[in-house]
Amino acid sequence: MSAMDVERKNAGGRAEAWGDITPDAARRLVSAAVHAFAERGYHATTTRDIAGRAGMSPAALYIHYKTKEELLYQISKVGHRLALDILEEARDGEGAPAERLATAVRGFVRWHAEHHMTARVVQYELGALGEEHHAEVIAMRRATDAAVRSIIEDGVGAGAFDVPDVRGTTVAVLSLCIDVARWFNARGRSTPDEVGDLYAGLVLRMVGADS
Amino acid sequence: MSAMDVERKNAGGRAEAWGDITPDAARRLVSAAVHAFAERGYHATTTRDIAGRAGMSPAALYIHYKTKEELLYQISKVGHRLALDILEEARDGEGAPAERLATAVRGFVRWHAEHHMTARVVQYELGALGEEHHAEVIAMRRATDAAVRSIIEDGVGAGAFDVPDVRGTTVAVLSLCIDVARWFNARGRSTPDEVGDLYAGLVLRMVGADS
């Protein structure tokens, strides 16, 4: 539990992930839901647990979110949007494909390290979303995949990368970065930036970038 | 849910992961627990749910496992042992470091793809283990890490690999393989062997193996 306490403190210091959610009560509920889902899982958490963590009554929660699933959807949507923004910005940036791929990996890794509790909920509770919400999130995941694939294709097209299987390598690059959320420990040896730098180098090797 | 039905069928076809657990009733309970934990999470599952899935009474479950945590521990221990065996066998095998690393990655990926439901429970519910069981499993995870690191160090020592950060690269290699359990879909485009082959090649690039 002490690792979670550390992250709770960190999340307090940089809660910018939820900065766009208003009013303040809704933002507090989302943050409480992330912690509850990460600790006990979506299905073991009640809206009463979430309201309690946010220091609110179940009735006050209901004003903002009608169901527990609505909270999960909000978390999933914001989480995917932020991660997607990082990748699309890198894709559309200036610079050679190798530079853009390194920027994408650094940013994506940093996001999964800094927000590893949110990222775990986003990644592992996907199956609990309602049908419509699930479809919407899957579309965002396809866009995430497409952003990275597009950079790799640019590199192959320019003769700068050597990638026999673009589709499979795209999955591998994203997967390597996403799994940072599982093992990253805020008290561990490496900072999010250090992991990001290491992984950018490893990914350039994976795509056979001429160095 | 239909993806889980598919895996349930697959698991029936190759339930060898639990083949060493006797008697048959205990093995059936472990298999039922994996499915229940994977679908709803550890904390949302009751021993009554597990007994029901195994077609047994709660009292019959109690003969084999005194608590839900004992079941999770059994799953975690067997899962880690099987994955560790694959890596240690590769480490101790004949052949150059590149060949042994490729064998390790192929086997480890295949395990996480074929047993992705078990692997998810093993990886994501680690925090629910009791203190003593947690310590035991962490020791097995250290051994897993050490097996891969040892192959990479052999390659660096032989001048066949170029790895500036052996510790970080070891984490990345294991992480890439483990995350297969999250995204692998038995109905998807690639077989476990195909993913294993692709990943063996990507990992040899990550360690800068001279090809």
Image (cartoon, coloured by chain):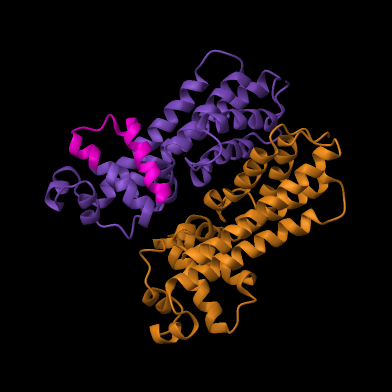
Chain colours: A purple, B orange
Q: Residue at x 61, y 59 (%)?
A: B139
Specify whether A187 is left or right of B87. Answer: left
| Residue B205, image x, y percentages | 74, 35
Specify whether A2 is left or right of A27. Answer: right
User: In the figure, residue B39 lies in which quadrant?
Assistant: bottom left
Q: Residue at x 76, y 43 (%)?
A: B152
User: In the figure, residue B111 lies in which quadrant?
Assistant: bottom right
Number of disc labels: 0
| Residue A110, image x, y percentages | 49, 31
Specify whether A207 is left or right of B70. Answer: right
- Residue A86 in the magenta stretch? The answer is no
| Residue A105, image x, y percentages | 55, 29
Q: Quarter holding the N terminus of chain B?
A: bottom left
Q: Is A15 placed above or below A156 here?
A: below
Q: Quarter holding the C terminus of chain B?
A: top right
- Which segment did they paint magenta? A2-28
Q: Residue at x 58, y 67 (%)?
A: B77
Query: In the rendered image, is residue B56 in sight?
Result: yes
Query: In the rendered image, is residue A17 in sight?
Result: no
Q: Is B127 placed above or below A110 here?
A: below
| Residue A125, image x, y percentages | 40, 51
Q: Is B47 placed above or below A13 here?
A: below
Q: Residue at x 57, y 48 (%)?
A: B179
Report the front residue among A70 and B155.
Answer: B155
In the image as oriented, which residue stretches furthest toward the top?
A94
